[in-house]
Image: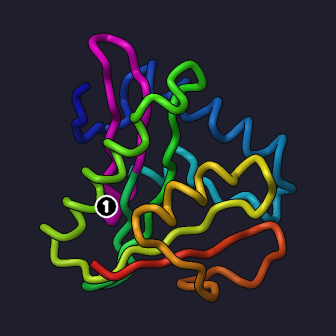
Amino acid sequence: MKIAVDDLSGPQIVGFLEEHVRQMREISPPESKHALDLDGLRRPEVTFWSVHDGAELVGCGALKRLDARHAELKSMRTAVARKRGGVATLLLEHILGEARAAGFTRVSLETGSAAFFLPARRLYAKFGFAECAPFADYRPDPLSTFMTRTL
């Protein structure tokens, strides 16, 4: 598998992310959906990576700079057919390494609190993320789980 910075211009990644946002809208009400759209992911404070296995797009994730030492993990997604195949683990290891190299000392994230998001919460806990209070512009939300870890 190959992980590379993606400029979000290709139709394959655009479709992959549109499906992600569509799925989040089905699961979460609008006030609890925090996935960034394409314009949000293209902002200068965001670095976005895609994961390919040959020509197949199998995952993606992003890191958003909040300040000089704190970043937010965004848009982690694995293709449905590749869930539980190591894509998310490989990508999360990569993003955390990139965060360290960029000088960040903390990475935080928001994910859902529903059962659907349990595998994601378990993965993040395995990587040392612990629940925390809302950060950045987030507000308390019973449908959100906030997690953070130091690097």
Q: Please, which residue is most extreme toward the top here?
A: 55
- Whether residue 144 appears in magenta in the rendering, the answer is no
Give left or right: position of 63 versus 101: right
Color scheme of the displayed model: rainbow
Horizontal side of residue 148 vs 97, given as left or right: right
Q: How many marks?
A: 1
Residue 101 higher or lower than 13, as above or below: below
Outermost bottom residue? 133
Q: Is residue 10 above or below residue 44?
A: above
Residue 148 percent coordinates (x, y):
47, 78
Q: Dot 1 corresponds to which residue?
A: 44
Q: Is residue 57 magenta?
A: yes
- Is residue 5 found left or right of 108 in the rendered image? left
- Magenta span: 43-61
Q: Amino acid at mark 1?
A: Pro
* Residue pictured at 59% horizontal, 79% vertical: 131
- Relative to 141, say whether 9 is above or below: above
x and y, in percent, of residue 8 in the image: 38, 35
Classified by dominant secondary structure, the portion drawn in magenta counts as strand
Residue at the spot 80% in from the left edge and 57% down from the top edge:
114
Residue 38, position as x, y percentages in the image: 51, 44
